[in-house]
Amino acid sequence: MSAVMDRIDDKISFKPVPYSREDVIRIAPALRMLLRKNETSIVVFKTNDLVSQYIEDEKEFYSIFSPIKNNQILNKILIPAYIVKYKDIDKQYRVIKEELNRRMDINIITIQDTGVFSWGGTKVAADKRMALFLDLVKVKKYSSLNNKINFSEIENTLFQSYGKVVLESQRVEKNLSEKIAIVTGAAQGFGKGIAESLAKEGANVILADLNEDMARENASKLNREYGQGKFLALEVDVANEDYVKNMIWETVAEYGGIDIFISNAGVLKAGSLESMDLESFELSTKVNYTAFFLCTKYASEPMKIQYRFCKDYFSDIIQINSKSGLEGSKKNFAYAGSKFGGIGLTQSFALELMEYNIKVNAVCPGNFFEGPLWSDPEEGLFIQYLRSNKVPGARTIKDVRKFYESKIPMKRGCQIEDIAKAIFYIIDQKYETGQVIPVTGGQIMLK
């Protein structure tokens, strides 16, 4: 940055302000669909104490762009629109649609008393466009304090910082380029592997987990490898409604919508009828069953809005179920029962949501022996099954593993790539919903 911008940064800073999350979750997905020029697009929302000064008045808003009015390139990067806010959402949608139809090249939109939305064909472009706008807000505020500014120097600085990046930001065409995906339970195990698989195919991924530190570590690694801003870590307890609502709000504010929701977070408490306590049973039900209801309820909201404004757009909700959801499991009834219930929810949600082009399917993995669910030295299934005498005659963890491997025709456990291929199939196809795909190496065969 130039010395002028450094001086402005020293004087002007942003502070967060409250905003209506309900307004954002209703408006951002609509803008995303109305503005999209490719298969996907990204919309980023921001508001803060400085921005709020300029979104209450249309004239004040447009004055922000005066420093770049003569720069043809920067004027292409920021093409603003100011839209009056209406309480009636249907009227709000009509006004937004009319404005965007009138000027198809708009890419930075202020909704009065709400905040600013920036559009981009990629997450990088949307983020850079928003950053340019926020710098112009700083310039506007700084100049209002009777400070002299070298506008030509600022113009060159802004072009160097944002112009080339936005204009040259190209979609790398992959199967899931710039799709927006949430994966719960993404700190480790299947969830971590699924997030990495989606990243390789070009998706933006929100890694949601109760273990926020581990999820953030995974997201940081992916951002370094695939591009800053494409991956976000969020703390979430999937069995807590407030956490789930916040997860959806944060995702929509940061990316503009949701294309793929993968409900992977789960818990397993093995034990016989005699040894199982009510607390453990209810925990299994809350995390494996009730949480899927909560996640589907709130994830489907922005998906429905996306469909409203683009009738050929498909979204996916996928539950990572289990082979235990396909047949009973001795001394593992709490887990199996919750997973059986998950399949019932999958089929029922599929019937209800298909009218919005939201496909709901389930993947039932076999045993992922290398994952923490099985291999954790304290709470893993190997040690749980050994303690509960689920495997007759087993004296070591190695005995338990050998016993379960012998049940699989393929003679090996399920791997991340096996699950990823099933997920990619579900997303790619447009003619199946309410289906359950076993990925068990032949151990479970549907009848």
Image (cartoon, grey):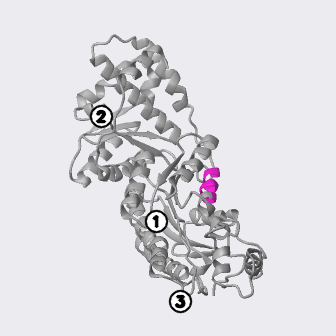
- The image quadrant where one finds the C terminus is bottom right
Residue corresponding to mark 2: 49
Element type where label 3 sits in the image: loop
Residue pictured at 57% horizontal, 51% vertical? 203
Q: Nearer the viewer, mark 1 or mark 3?
A: 3
Q: Nearer the viewer, mark 2 or mark 3?
A: 3
Residue 140 found in image quarter: top left
Q: Which mark is residue 358?
A: 1
Task: Look at the picture and state if 313 lies above or below 418.
Answer: above
Q: Which mark is residue 274?
A: 3
Q: Amino acid at mark 3?
A: Glu
Element type where label 2 sits in the image: loop
Sequence-first tag of 2 and 3: 2
Q: Nearer the viewer, residue 361 or 184?
A: 184
Q: Nearer the viewer, mark 2 or mark 1?
A: 2
Question: Bounds of the magenta span?
Answer: 193-201
Residue pictured at 55% horizontal, 81% vertical? 336
Residue 384 found in image quarter: bottom right
